[in-house]
Image: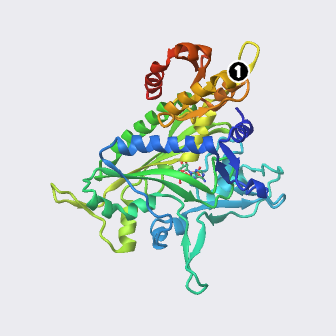
Amino acid sequence: MTLEALVNYAKTYGFIYQGSEIYGGLSNTWDFGPLGVTLKRTLKDLWWHTFVTQDAHVVGLDSAILLHPKTWEASGHVGGFSDPLIDCKSCKTRHRADHLIESAGLGLSADGLSKETLEGMIKEHQIVCPNCGKHDFTPIREFNLMFKTGIGVTEESTQSIYLRPETAQGIFLNFKNIQRTSRQKVPFGIAQIGKSFRNEITPGNFIFRTREFEQAELEFFCAPGEEKNWFESYKAKMKEFLLDLGLDETHLKFEDHPEEKLSHYSNATTDVMYEFPWGFDELWGLASRTDYDLKQHQDYSGVNLEYIDPITNERYIPYVVEPSLGIERLFLAVLHDALEEEALENDTRTLLRIHPKLAPVQVAVLPLIKKRHKAMAEDVFKALLGEFRVQYDESGAIGRRYRRQDAIGTPYCVTIDDDSLEKNTVTLRLRDSMEQITLSLDELNPYLKKALTR
Ligand code: ATP
């Protein structure tokens, strides 16, 4: 499935539309339609369920998007959260220097390298502009990715403030509050899901890189020396989560950063890579961040953020392990993995072979003939509404209605026909095998419950 086909599919079926379309569109913004918002919510709910609800040592948070400006000085974002920007002097296109090097087809890796090193590499390998093929670039400039805005009503009283570029800092700011009020003992974690904003130099690849996106982040606080164990345990948990969503294991890669490539605050980092239509790219990051963040906030705020071990009375700043996931990237991976054009005997069908627990519509109720079967179909629909994600569709030939449900990934279609009226039975059609089975009306709900809570 090409990216273009995926974008068309997402629009045709109401998963994702171009943002502000009636005004000609606002580039790289996307709106999630009825099926899209349902899938996105389901993914967030499953993440929350797995990483928060099911774990007695993790609690949740929903912090503000606007944080005190000092937050971003302490975190290093004001000074260091920038991307290396380079312009082609010939065709005036703008590039991220590290991406320019990595996509040159030379197998080079440029992540986290200094401006000088990147410039040296571009020169040494005579890397050319992917747009015009010339090697004629400006020097690299560092471009800060944070969106700045003003808070306050009058010109004079306006204070500069940033939209958060990650949700994690809201967690660090609340570490002490949460530890005290929820009476958690280290080791414990704090999780949140929310919007983040980055003024990306080169947004693109559909919803993969946008300026506004959602992150699901978790900061797990542990005693110094224990972070590597927690790191490995989260790595395993993340893998299990992705496989449980039905992603094909061969489309996933866990890439450990080599020692020399680690950020100054990190003693272990792994990128979870998924094979998107353009190749493997980052889906989820896992970083062991030592005590860097809490120490910085302690220094900048003057508030003591140490933890006192209740048994040993030892005081220390906890170490942190952070899994950080982009919800839209997960959405894209799930859609890409499930979507196929399946060849049938004399035909093809668009099939979204998505895990039933993720399907935006889990059950479709279809009267075979509208006039005759509508009343009973509506009763069946009403009985299932609220129990499952269910849709009623009475228009068009039954074959076409099945195809539409296949295309949006509906695992079960319930058809009401003459037998239903006479014998109180329904026909259940299965998406993947297209097999049809007969169930009595009484069996329907328990059958679906069992099938959909697997
Ligand atoms: P990249 O190298 O792709 O720019 P990153 O390493 O800067 O990503 P992190 O800061 O580690 O990303 O953010 C954690 C996660 O948030 C990423 O793994 C990704 O899933 C998601 N993410 C980051 N930037 C974006 C974006 N611009 N659009 C969508 N998701 C994003």
Q: Camera-side residue: 165 or 117?
A: 165
Q: Camera-side residue: 433 or 225?
A: 433
> Residue 355 location, x and y as percent?
53, 29
**Which residue shows up at 50% across the image and 64% down it?**
65
Please state if 247 lies on the left or on the right of 314 as rendered. right
**Which residue shows up at 61% across the image and 32% down it?**
392
> Residue 408 location, x and y as percent?
64, 32
Whether 95 is drawn above or below 445: the answer is: below
Whether 341 is drawn above or below 81: the answer is: above
Please state if 20 lies on the left or on the right of 265 as rendered. right
Residue 26 sits in which quadrant?
bottom right
> What is the three-letter code of the residue carrying label 1?
Gly
Whether 94 is drawn above or below 343: the answer is: below
Please state if 80 lies on the left or on the right of 229 as rendered. right
Residue indicated by mark 1: 399
> Residue 253 location, x and y as percent?
53, 35
Q: Secondary structure at mark 1?
A: helix
Q: Quadrant of the C terminus?
A: top left
Numbered disc total: 1
**Is residue 120 at least partly visible in the picture?**
no
**Which residue shows up at 60% across the image and 21% down it?**
415
Q: Does the residue tagged 1 have its C-beta within 8 Å of any atom of ligand 1? A: no
